Amino acid sequence: MKRTDRRVSRAVLPGTYDPFTNGHLDLLLRGLPIFDEVIIAVARSARKKPLFTLRERLDLISGATEGIERTRVETFGGLLIDYVRSTGAGAIIRGLRAVSDFEYEFQMALMNRSLDAQVETVFLMPSAEYTFLTASMIKEVASFGGCVHGLVPENVELALKKKYKTMKCK
């Protein structure tokens, strides 16, 4: 096996981000010491029927990451690997919350490697306090009026309160 001494300076952190959670923010903050720049790539993903429009998701993430240097927020459609190539990034950051995430993420990483062997997938574990957290879970809790304070950035919490009028915190 040939080893390359190529340093990867830019990484892509892809997702639907419907909504952006503190777990997502945690992965970004974990990636920044490793890479010179991290691009948060928001998937259009209309087939998932997102709660927030693409524009809303971009605005919420931009608000939540305001002031965090070496970060930018963009949108993409189509194959992730094509988008990664177009940015000049050499890595994809993926979060692993639990063993149950591993099989799917491993298969995706191998598929991406088969499409472009120059792009690495880097798996990062979130802080223990976010290992249970998913965007789907946040939406479900908020839709039933539950409090998601501390699980999402403040601007996302406010946006969820507007979408789900029943949401309240003690």
Image (spheres, helix red, strand yellow):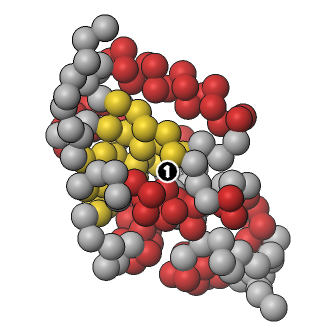
Residue 36 in sight from this viewpoint? yes
Residue 39 in sight from this viewpoint? no
Locate residue 164: give its quadrant.
bottom right
Locate residue 111: give its quadrant.
top left
Q: Which one is in front, 123 or 105?
A: 123
Q: Position of residue 147 (x, y in %)?
A: 76, 79
Q: Is residue 67 above or below residue 1?
A: below
- If the image is split into quadrants, where does the N terminus sit? top left
Which residue is rendered at x = 73% and y = 55% of the image? 132
Which residue is rendered at x = 25% and y = 11% of the image? 2
Q: Position of residue 144 (x, y in %)?
A: 82, 71
10 Å neighbourhood of mark 1: few (<14), some, or many (≥20)? many
Residue type at mark 1 is Thr
- If the image is split into quadrants, where does the C terminus sit? bottom right
Judged from the image, the secondary structure of the residue bearing numbered disc 1 is loop
Q: How many marks?
A: 1
Locate residue 137: give its quadrant.
bottom right
Q: Which one is in front, 17 or 35?
A: 35
Q: Is residue 156 above or below residue 91?
A: below
Q: Position of residue 72 (x, y in %)?
A: 27, 62
Residue 97 relative to residue 83: left or right? right
Q: Is residue 21 above or below residue 136?
A: below
Which residue is rendered at x = 25% and y = 36% of the image? 90
Which residue is rendered at x = 60% and y = 28% of the image? 104
Q: Which residue is mark 1?
A: 16
